[in-house]
Amino acid sequence: MKNVKEIKIEIKGKDWENAIDAAFNKNKKDIKMAGFRKGAVPKEIYIKKAGIESLFAEASDIAIEDAYKKALDEFKEELVCEPAVAINKCDKEGIEYTFTLISHPEVKLGAYKNLGIKKEAVKVTKEEINEEIEHMQDRFAEKVVKENGEVVVGDTATIDFEGKVEGKVIDGGTGKNYPLEIGSHSFIPGFEEGVVGMKVGETKVLNLKFPEEYVEALKGKDVEFTVTLNKIETRVRPEINKDFFEDLAIEGIDSLEKLEDYVKGNIKESKEKNADNKYTDEVLHKACDNMKVEINKEIIDSEVERMIRQYSQELRSQGFSFEQYLQMTGQNIENVRSMMSNQAEARIKTRYLLEAVSKEEKVKVTKEEIKKYIKDNADKYSISEQEFTDYVGGEDAIEYDLKLNKALDIVKEA
């Protein structure tokens, strides 16, 4: 590929001698040899006994830093991922490395604005408003005992139950006065549905099957549950009145009409955000499809590793390690890399698209815009402007993000 360059760098003569000396001195304190104190063996004696080749591995690690700098000087382009390194030869005369360096691939823009995609129109129905208000009422609903009637979805059924497989009671398959919320799906499929319609004092036998993804000892097996209903509790929503508005504690809401307007505004805002996200995804997808770019596997692999590091940090902030995540989900690192590969490629394409649009449209970001961005976000997170600037990687990183945001606005032009 055009953006891949192999550069051979040789370290020899005095530079290689210095690397070998450094390798010996690094390990000298641990060298033991008959006739000498530990750490006091002269280099010449050590080489005569162990051979100069024993120092090559350490010396190559030391010399590679200088070789890498020389390769970058010769490359004179921006690296987009860590280079691959191979050692071609290594002897007492010197060492030769081959660095495989990858720069940004060539991007050829296609159509990227006025793409004929329409943003979805947003409307809020009366049913949606009523449903949301009912959810609000549910937050303050009280449980009351249902004296008569049957279990329906939403009720809490207090039950005794006993589960048997092949006539034997299963471990953990029994309970006394267990409060089961119908509709919570906390039991295996069919159990809650079987309780629906029962009356207090009734006993019922449910013949079910454990799902295939259940624990190994029980998955796919037939099970017989004997269920006795002891009590039914139903949730009673509060009336929409002054007390309810006080419980809600939303400023300015003291009537049903105002509550409906408030709820309508929230639903509309959420729908507009979702519609904009969907529109953004669609225009970016189409603009990327119109673009021509060949992305190296190494660039995708590098992005996957970055995504894994980012996700690991998020897990650590929640008190988990990435290794624990793999154990809990039954995955291995290669599964995760494979799953993330397509997402990584899409991210890279989007980034290259917006960089190319920014360049094509000659997008500029002013110092004032950068300062405003820093101030607004520092105020938002209640930290100093310098703390925010350092956190996001400096003003150059901010300028880059703002350029891409402006490029995105251009792509979203109808």
Image (tube, helix red, strand yellow):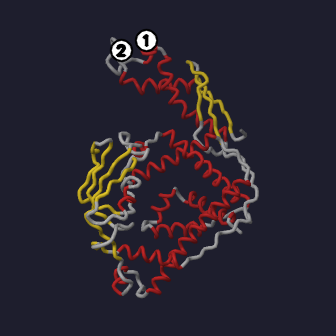
Q: Quadrant of residue 275?
A: bottom right
In which quadrant is the N terminus drawn?
top right
Spatial CA distance of label 1 from label 2 is: 9 Å
Check disc 1 and report its element: helix, strand or loop: helix
Please name whichever residue, 233 or 105, is drawn nearer the observer in this view of the structure: 233
Residue hosting label 1: 49
Q: Quadrant of residue 37?
A: top left
Residue 236 position, x and y percent, is 34, 76
Residue 55 position, x and y percent, is 48, 21
Q: Which mark is residue 355?
A: none
Q: Residue at x 51, y 70 (%)?
A: 376
Answer whether residue 239 is visible to the viewer in this image.
yes
The answer to whether marks 1 and 2 mark residues whose Cβ atoms lie closer than 8 Å is: yes
Up the image or down, 123 lies above or below 186; here it is below
Residue 110 position, x and y percent, is 76, 56
Q: Residue at x 40, y 81 (%)?
A: 250
Answer whether residue 323 is visible to the viewer in this image.
no
Q: Residue at x 38, y 73 (%)?
A: 138
- Amino acid type shown at disc 2: Met
Sort mark 1 into few (<14), some (14-19) or many (20+) by Cα contacts within 10 Å.
few
Up the image or down, 246 lies above or below 317; here it is below
Which one is earlier in the sequence, the residue at label 1 or at label 2? 2
Q: Is residue 28 left or right of residue 272?
A: left
In which quadrant is the C terminus drawn?
bottom right
Please name whichever residue, 383 or 271, is drawn nearer the observer in this view of the structure: 271
Residue hosting label 2: 33
Up the image or down, 145 lies above or below 346; here it is below
Up the image or down, 43 lies above or below 341; here it is above
